Amino acid sequence: MRVSRLLPLLLGVGLLAGCASSHVLTGTPRAPIDPAQVRIYHGPPPGQYEEIAILNTSSGALTYGEQNKVDSVLQKLRNEAAKLGANGVLFQGTADGYRSGGVSVGGGVGRGGGRSFSSAGVGVDISPQQKYASGVAIWVANPPPADAPQTPPVLPGSTE
């Protein structure tokens, strides 16, 4: 009976652990802020900024649909950056995770105590492929307004 009570708890912990975000400090963290104040940058922001940490996250085992996966990882990057006091994330990109799935079939027949029993089971893994994302948590001294368009960085040798 103890095992049957412990199993749901262990499964829940396993699912939560699979959805965790992580960071590696590369600078000095600041006081935590509201994740809504964290802006995602697809290129270096104008002006000065300070790197705080490298961030890594995944969409989670039960996130379906490409847009939902991207939204999930971006929100998780914001949340992790906000915990470190960063007001921006310099987005590094996404990658699709390895998906192991398939169908397994198992069964068994046994006899015990003068009674016979039989059992069979079919398991199907329908969990989606996870999306992984990385970014750099940054603190921007004078962030541009939220509605200001982001300009792509000018590459050396370009004619602009």
Image: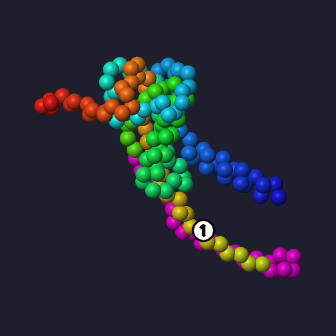
- How far across and how far down the image is residue 115, in percent? 84, 80
Please state the horizontal and vertical placement of residue 93, each as a whole percent of the image.
38, 41
Which stretch is magenta? Answer: 95-116
The residue identified by callout 1 is 123
Expressed as whole percent of the image width and height from the top left, the position of residue 145 reads 37, 28
Which element type, helix, strand or loop, lies under badge 1?
A: strand
Query: Is any part of residue 23 visible from this angle?
Result: no
* Vertical comparison of 127 with 81: above or below: below
Left or right for 24, reference 158: right
Observer able to see residue 79 = yes
| Image quadrant assignment for residue 159 | top left
Image quarter where the C terminus lies is top left
Picture layout, residue 11 above or below residue 20: below
Using the image as rendered, state which of residue 36 and residue 96 is in the foreground: 36
Left or right for 48, reference 68 = left
Residue at the spot 53% in from the left edge and 39% down from the top edge: 21
